[in-house]
Image: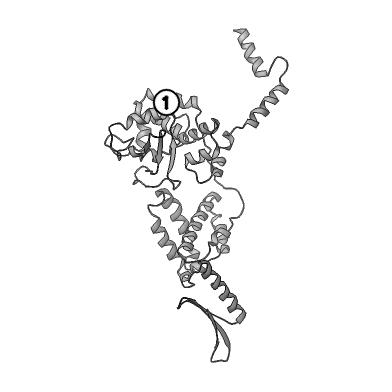
Amino acid sequence: MTISRVTRSDGTVRFRVRVKSGRNVVASRTFDKKGDAQLWESAQKRSLYLGEFVDPKAGRELIGAAMDRWHVGREGTIGNKTYSDTERPALRHVKALRSRPVGAVTARDFETLYATLLRSLSRDTVVRYRQVYSAFFSWAVASKLVNKNVVIDSQIPKGTSTKAKREIFPFNVAELRAVHTEMLSYSNKTNADIVLVLGLSGLRWGELAALRVRDVQQLPYPALRVSRSQSDGQEVRNVTKGGKTRTVPLTDEVASIILPLIRHKQPDDLVYPNTVGKPRTNRNWTRDSHWGDVHRGRRVHDLRHTAATIWLQSGVDLKTVQAWLGHSSATLTADLYAHYMGSDADTAALARMNRVLGDAGGTPIKKLQRSRTAVN
């Protein structure tokens, strides 16, 4: 690297820095002050040494064009709903920044954007859009367009979402079995057994629909290898919502349902095909199984929550439940199911309170039970 003194025709002096990689000049910049030139030169030396150097010319690409290029490349690698319903509108809302060079956009620019979006969108939506912008800048860093993800430093104004979160509504074990029994009176055993499979394995519907014989593991223990998903009306995606393949062990009950279904089938055959061998759709199953007559106010997706709460209440540790569900972090799992995670401390505290509130005749509940027995 060199700093050269440049005298202009009007007599003013400027300082030009040339950045070389080997014999090639990879970047250059001119400064009015020698001190500024030296600082910039030092920064370029450091980035070259650490392998973080980014050609300043790369950052001149307009952010709109770069985002479009990135977005097109994402199709098929993420869920179709995420691609069309979250990512596409998020990029559409960056109108004010699209004509700016990607290297010139700052965290402050995004904070201004968030404030504008909050006038018409819920905070939850803006949070999702921020995740999209951060994913784009992570790609831009990896693509050597910029050397920093500026979205990480941006903050969404504090406040609560205007849209209430939908609460989970899992079945307990007795309710799950009751729904299965009731469904048997409306539909065939295969349709009814899907309730138990979803409610005890935690699979999403799309993961069940895409499940192949080769995905059923029998040794060293029965399990499902979940690596694909298929939403109704969409092509099969070779990636799950969580983005990673996971293994879900099967209880004896679920294994006894799944294993007979795969006998005499080929490895690429579906475990749960429809009548013509195609993936079974959620819509058709809810119709054929009479889900609307037995669901007790739940969604099909609440069967996944049912499995999670049964695992946690059975003493399965949080990290294991996270892995079985395919969540990105244990924090996400804890946030969803914290109020279903009873602890030994809760049990001990409740026992102490019952001892304090009860008398020599026992707790009010036990006295009530005895009185009913005496009457009978």
- Vertical order, 116 against 190 (above or below): below
Q: Where does residue 119 sit, x and y in percent of width and height? A: 56, 55
Count of marks placed on residues: 1
Is the residue marked by circle 1 packed among few (<14), some (14-19), or many (20+) residues within 10 Å? some
Type of amino acid at the residue the image marks with label 1: His
Report the front residue among 165 and 201.
Answer: 201
Q: Can residue 162 be seen here?
A: yes
SS type, badge 1: helix
Q: Is residue 368 left or right of residue 264?
A: right
Q: Out of 376 and 339, give the one closest to the viewer.
A: 339
Above or below residue 246? Residue 367 is: above
Q: Which residue is mark 1?
A: 180
Q: Residue at x 56, y 44 (%)?
A: 331
Question: Going 45% across and 68% down the picture, which residue do you hit?
Answer: 62
Q: Position of residue 296 (x, y in %)?
A: 47, 29
Q: The C terminus lies in which quarter of the figure?
A: top right
> What residue is shown at x 33% (from left), y 29% (from top)?
260
| Residue 290 visible (yes or no) | no
Q: Is residue 272 left or right of residue 354?
A: left
Percent position of residue 304, x then y: 46, 36
Q: Is residue 138 above or below residue 320?
A: below
Return the x and y of residue 16 as percentages of the image width and height. Answer: 54, 82
